Amino acid sequence: MASNLSATPHPPPPALPEAPFAFVLHFIRFYLPGVLGVALLEAGQSTCGILLPYAIKQIMDAVMGAQAAAADAWARSRGRCGCSRGSISAFCCARAAAA
């Protein structure tokens, strides 16, 4: 059976800083974009989650007003599509932050 190991040695790993602050900065430079991305996605998800009940209230008020005025409920609530956009945005932010 042939061996797939190469005869050339791997390069040595980079030296880590010995000072504590420099050591932390070394890893912050590497992980900061990912951590900021997750923080922004979580902020978006929580914002959508907080505003979603207000959007549902707007749609319910429009439907109740249409029933009271004997008007078309779909026409009265057409401008209040923030509910569906908000729920889709909250779902997308939550799924992306969890990935």
Image (cartoon, rainbow, N blue to C red):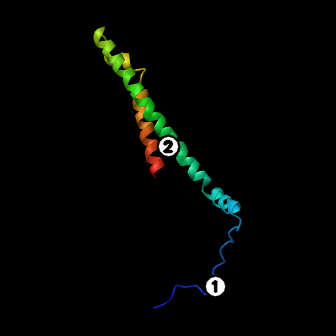
Q: Position of residue 12 (x, y in %)?
A: 66, 77
Regarding residue 75, the answer to whether it shows in the image is: no
Give the residue number, with chain letter if any, for mark 2: 42
Q: Going by the picture, which residue comes out furthest to the front?
A: 20
Q: Quadrant of residue 86?
A: top left
The residue at the point 47 percent across, 38 percent down is 46
The residue at the point 33 percent across, 12 percent down is 65
- Going by the numbered disc 2, the residue's amino acid type is Glu
Above or below, 31 against 12 in this view is above
The answer to whether marks 2 and 1 mark residues whose Cβ atoms lie closer than 8 Å is no
**Disc marking residue 59:** none
Quadrant containing the N terminus in the rendered view: bottom left
Q: Position of residue 16 (x, y in %)?
A: 68, 69
Q: Between 64 and 16, which is closer to the camera in this rendering?
A: 16
Mark 1 element type: loop
Above or below, 37 against 81 in this view is below
- Going by the numbered disc 1, the residue's amino acid type is Thr
